[in-house]
Image (cartoon, rainbow, N blue to C red):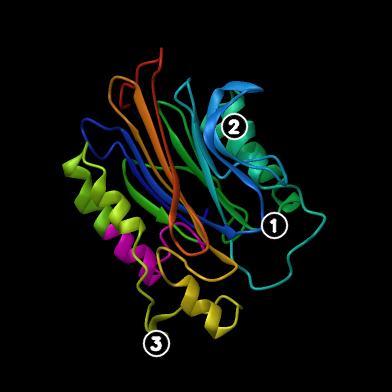
């Protein structure tokens, strides 16, 4: 997952709204979002190589998502799979704050990541890069790409602005998928320097990443209504940026979100 936008308690009718793009090599096998047969309360896509996920929800109003932290090199081959950070929270019962504190205690086991976890009351964030301090987030709109929370990369700034503009129009979905489909390449003068070649900085500067071997494979919109109705819509794409499938799952939780 290489772009996550979150509105937390920022819309009176939708306490949680998430729009996200997952960027990955096309050869890495993955299953589209679904309820997992071995963990029936969990709704998420599945990485078929390491077994974890990049974004998901549970019937108990739990949410988790992560992005990798781009470092341009030094990736450890012996590191633990970051995708389990999502699935372990979704299938567990720790509070968001307790979970990110526990993850922080073993942060060196993983390559760089950004992690969001939430239940019906709290949204927590942790990255094992930067200041490495887990924290609970106040109501508001947040975004992360492959650096730290709210780092003002051009793609994140433009996507976050479009996301905020789309929120009052819910339940309309089109504006969210339109912003996730933006393929505009940022001018060289505004590109970040993350340790990858300039050609890749250009490719990765778009909200929707497109190249022959690597790119945006899934765009996801997740909404949770005040009464606990949760809807996840995921669109999947091939290397030509052509839509290959769409999943729409909706369920009513037995828990009620109070918007604390």
Kindly state the secondary structure of the residue where label 1 is placed: loop
Kindly state the secondary structure of the residue where label 3 is placed: helix
**Which residues fall within the magenta stretch?**
146-161
Q: Which residue is mark 3?
A: 189
Between 159 and 141, the residue placed more toward the observer is: 159
Q: Which residue is mark 1?
A: 111
122 relative to 221, above or below = above
47 relative to 38, above or below = below
Q: Which residue is mark 2?
A: 89
Mark 1, other Cα within 10 Å: few <14 / some 14–19 / many ≥20? many
105 relative to 182, above or below = above
Q: Is residue 204 left or right of residue 179?
A: right
Please state the horizontal and vertical placement of residue 222, each as a whole percent of the image.
38, 38
Between 37 and 151, the residue placed more toward the observer is: 37
Which residue reaches farthest bottom?
Answer: 189
Given contact means CB atoms under 8 Å apart, are the residues at marks 1 and 2 in contact?
A: no
Please state the horizontal and vertical placement of residue 33, each as a whole percent of the image.
51, 37
Q: Quadrant of residue 85?
A: top right
Mark 2, other Cα within 10 Å: few <14 / some 14–19 / many ≥20? many
Please state the horizontal and vertical placement of residue 105, each as a whole percent of the image.
70, 43
Residue that appears at 76% across and 48% down: 80
Mark 3, other Cα within 10 Å: few <14 / some 14–19 / many ≥20? few
């Amino acid at each position: 997952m290489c772009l996550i936008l979150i509105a937390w308690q920022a819309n009176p009718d939708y306490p949680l709204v998430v729009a996200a793009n997952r960027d990955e090599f096309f050869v890495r096998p993955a299953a589209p979002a679904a309820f997992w047969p071995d963990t029936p309360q969990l709704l998420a896509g599945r990485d078929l190589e390491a077994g974890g996920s990049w974004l998901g929800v549970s019937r108990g109003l739990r949410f988790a998502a992560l992005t990798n932290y781009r470092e341009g090199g030094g990736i450890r081959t012996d590191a633990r799979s970051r995708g389990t950070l999502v699935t372990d929270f979704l299938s567990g019962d720790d509070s968001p704050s307790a979970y990110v504190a526990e993850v922080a205690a073993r942060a060196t086991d993983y390559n760089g990541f950004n992690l969001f976890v939430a239940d019906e009351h709290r949204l927590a964030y942790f990255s094992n890069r930067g200041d490495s301090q887990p924290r609970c987030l106040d109501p508001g709109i947040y975004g992360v790409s492959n650096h730290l929370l709210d780092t003002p990369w051009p793609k994140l700034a433009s996507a976050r602005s479009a996301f905020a503009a789309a929120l009052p129009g819910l339940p309309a979905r089109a504006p969210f998928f339109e912003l996730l489909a933006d393929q505009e390449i940022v001018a060289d003068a505004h590109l970040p320097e993350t340790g990858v070649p300039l050609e890749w900085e250009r490719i990765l500067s778009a909200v929707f990443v497109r190249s022959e071997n690597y790119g945006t494979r899934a765009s996801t919109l997740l909404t949770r209504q005040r009464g606990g109705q949760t809807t996840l819509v995921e669109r999947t794409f091939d290397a030509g940026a052509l839509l290959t499938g769409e999943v729409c799952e909706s369920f009513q939780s037995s828990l009620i979100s109070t918007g604390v």
